Image: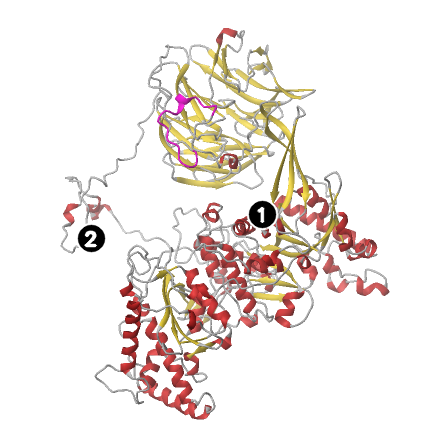
Amino acid sequence: MNFEGLDPGLAEFASAMHSTLDPVLDAHLNPSLLQNVELDPEGVALEALPVQESVHIMEGVYSELHSVVAEVGVPVSVSHFDLHEEMLWVGSHGGHATSFFGPALERYSSFQVNGSDDIRQIQSLENGILFLTKNNLKYMARGGLIIFDYLLDESEDMHSLLLTDSSTLLVGGLQNHVLEIDLNTVQETQKYAVEIPGVTIMRQTNRFFFCGHTSGKVSLRDLRSFKVEHEFDAFSGSLSDFDVHGNLLAACGFSSRLTGLACDRFLKVYDLRMMRAITPLQVHVDPAFLRFIPTYTSRLAIISQSGQCQFCEPTGLANPADIFHVNPVGPLLMTFDVSASKQALAFGDSEGCVHLWTDSPEPSFNPYSRETEFALPCLVDSLPPLDWSQDLLPLSLIPVPLTTDTLLSDWPAANSAPAPRRAPPVDAEILRTMKKVGFIGYAPNPRTRLRNQIPYRLKESDSEFDSFSQVTESPIGREEEPHLHMVSKKYRKVTIKYSKLGLEDFDFKHYNKTLFAGLEPHIPNAYCNCMIQVLYFLEPVRCLIQNHLCQKEFCLACELGFLFHMLDLSRGDPCQGSNFLRAFRTIPEASALGLILADSDEASGKGNLARLIQRWNRFILTQLHQDMQELEVPQAYRVAGGSFCSSGDSVIGQLFNCEVENCSLCRCGSETVRASSTLLFTLSYPEDKTGKNYDFAQVLKRSICLEQNTQAWCDNCEKYQPTIQTRNIRHLPDILVINCEVNSSKEADFWRIQAEVAFKMSVKKHGGEIKNKEFALADRKDLGNPEGLLLCPSIEELKNVWLPFSIRMKMTKNKGLDVCNWTDGDEMQWGPARAEEEHGVYVYDLMATVVHILDSRTGGSLVAHIKVGETYHQRKEGVTHQQWYLFNDFLIEPIDKHEAVQFDMNWKVPAILYYVKRNLNSRYNLNIKNPIEASVLLAEASLARKQRKTHTTFIPLMLNEMPQVGDLVGLDAEFVTLNEEEAELRSDGTKSTIKPSQMSVARITCVRGQGPNEGIPFIDDYISTQEQVVDYLTQYSGIKPGDLDAKISSKHLTTLKSTYLKLRFLIDIGVKFVGHGLQKDFRVINLMVPKDQVLDTVYLFHMPRKRMISLRFLAWYFLDLKIQGETHDSIEDARTALQLYRKYLELSKNGTEPESFHKVLKGLYEKGRKMDWKVPEPESQTSPKSKAWDGTRETELDAAVFSSVLAL
């Protein structure tokens, strides 16, 4: 049905309007409708039940049999009687499909087809159901399993489909073409051009295809060529519905009047034999739907949206006595369908209810329906429980059906023959880049397929496996990847090359010669690294986030503050946002918005990164705004010269929030004004194909002060009416965030055209003339006079530039907004921007651009251009200046400012823009007060339910034991594996790590390093985790299954955030950590510790260019201790590291005699080589050194720990 001309106009229905429905009965609903209906917390009916137990049906006359609720409050968009089974299918504006079985309308299946778009048409096939949404065609089994999901072009707006035969489908919509799709191959086979765009209804007879257009015309097209044979101009306004039967075509629609479109009560009827109109049929209802119901005669059923239904003959006169009324729950009927048997009619209304009218008490939907398969009853409750821990449990308790037939595994050998599958041809890219050593050839993996997977070659006619099987020769040589020949190296996706030492020998300095910190990309969902950098380099945001601390376990604001603290401490070393991304994965809203990518999607590049980062941008601002609202605004964030933010608002809201007025003007003159706020704006591009010049400021103003025509509810008219929606600005934000929404070729072409026009205008402005479309560097000329040479940009700097560095915005007295591009010359003419702010004039400077680097093979990557301010340079480098930088994960490089606004749409597409008010930092007090207090080290309750004091392994610090600057703390951590390492074996036999294993900290222990309780732990936390653990590494970690489960663990179980705060406090207070291999420990815990606070025994007892020595061997050699027998214990390891450090000070005379200590190390390495670095068994030789630690001392310490704990 065509929603363009209909009165309700709910084609763009927003499901968010019904997101807060309470589980109560709507006032408009008939209470008898929802007898025994249960509503879940979302307000959606769980069971669709009939209105009443029995309904009297008069034979041969249509009357209502049943009514059910599909989804409460969500309008029904389409209904369809199944052509193969006794089922009725219903689609909603929320993208949900529901099926009902039989005339009793018992709910059969219910599933989500699309998360955002409405279902526009349903077509039943033998094996499943086809669902058409705006730009998606989905084929699903009747139970809800997806058979295929065909995504159409993003610019498509589909409304109708027509099944021409069992395997061919026509799909039409508001564009100027109709697609033909082969259902066997799920591919587009033809694209038929349509002279009149807007094909919203399609029918077929044995002579023609009939296409109904939004313009009110019906075209008759040839069945083979799809060419127009005849055309009927039915209505002057728009077409609502039409149907064909025999030699007659009947249509209803809207006619143009002075006041707009009006429903035409004359049905247009055409004789297909003579191809001309016959006498129009006047009806007594406002026709919105019509169908031929040829039972005894060729009757027409005409339905109005208010629920009136009239039957009449197409060549006779309509009788008012033939009108009956459907009683919809909602105000409007939205859809209508007739069963194949003509015995049943289905109506769907705007409140989500479905009404079934029949002409007999026991109707059938089809003349010959097949039997419907129902789900088998659950047998779990009837089966005996089996305890798999019992080795002698008889497996015969599992019931197995008894059969006397031959099993499939008994297939006779005579009936089978081996047929090996022919190997697919080697990828042409591999052959092109292959290098030979003797008879062995090796080449880099082009990554055109998933690892360790080879697709089956099912058909001999399949010429190629994928679109990358033929690769042209690279224009810049064989060593470069051909699809990246136009992309500068610094913009390409960077990857970490792992060796057997992991990251230790990877040269990050090669990619980052600055003192700013990059972010590592190998963590799941690290696509947001560039946006994290943008938020970090916004000084008010950085200070606000680092001042925030709350009690929530997974708070994105807290984790972002911890990550910002690491970026502050780093001196060019990369950081990783593993803890932030871990918390990000636990947010339900992030998963619901599709922001959590699976590893396979990231590797294959299935996700659209430009759309993804723009949704992430909106999500993170909203989430931070909500997190900040839960706490009182800090004193440090009092606005200079002002007061606190308003109650319910946050500082994030004050920085990004823009107060707007949404005005809705109905054609009756009624106006509704509603105040709201938004944290960012989305660019809305003009529909212009002439190449007209638009300033960026013009497009921005159009997007901020948005005006659009849409259908909305009018309280004055008491129905949905076409309204004019306008948005006015009441208050401008301090930081203007813009999502570019360049998601299709149409928007990309707009940017490209505007950049070309701006380039021509810039050259003319500077006195140059354009002779050719492209300029070579060798032909570069001076664009101005010789005196102004330094002020004139080069030709290359002017190319692909449309975005201004500054914009000027002014609030007018009549709530209007003036926006214009702003240059340095304008400032010289108009004066400083600060002086004009008193008059509502603000200048915004471009601070960051996030761009999508296109790569068809991997999905591309995201990078950011960021203008780093003076305060950051002052802290890192001790200089005061501003500079643009490129942030590409761990690659950071200074760039020219023009590079930040140059977008070559062939490979570099803008995604997000950040503009900040000039002199923004002066508006805020940017002091950071460390929110972590000493109380985090005091005693706390365990999450474990079964923990007892007798199991306590540590004594918390007392108030008089609080650590001071320079105190020693022994530290050790144990880890578990969340994801296994991914590696491949190269053709030369070497192993290459593609992705390292993902570790998670499971236990953290800190022991006292001085005082009377030296060696006694004060932290021994087991970290609870909600993520699936692949390997507990019990042999190396001592962690057993169940230790991290709060339900059964007997350990002192805490959250990662709780223990992280303890370590952060120790770092901030200035203690020195002593341990073995602390670099890896801090990396997995996700901490950045200054190097002068780390005393790592793995480096203290190490000679250059020699191997690292294990803690176990060092303890045996220097301390005569046998540790790490069966498993590792972090208390034992931390205590041993402290003893080794004391031994180091003793041997090196506190570092004053390095030569004598060097001799000790030589003896250590000689002994290690002789022993093959293995500690001897207890009965073999003892340590060559005298005991440096009395064994009884350790026993006394252990006894002291437990006796002290019992005394607490």
Between 1011 and 384, the residue placed more toward the observer is 1011
Image x and y of residue 568, in percent: 56, 67
User: Can you tell which of label 2 and label 1 is closer to the viewer?
Assistant: 1
Observer-nearest of 1203 and 1141:
1203
Q: From the viewer's perspective, is 951 left or right of 653?
A: left
Marks 2 and 1, how far apart at CA:
56 Å
Q: Is residue 606 above or below residue 59?
A: below
> Residue beneath label 1, please?
649
Q: Which residues are magenta?
A: 27-43
Q: Which residue is mark 2?
A: 388
274 to the left or right of 97: right
Residue 469, can we see it? Answer: no
The percent coordinates of residue 874 (x first, y second) are: 65, 69
Q: Nearer the viewer, residue 671 or 979?
A: 671
Q: Nearer the viewer, residue 693 or 1034?
A: 1034
Q: Position of residue 763 (x, y in %)?
A: 79, 55
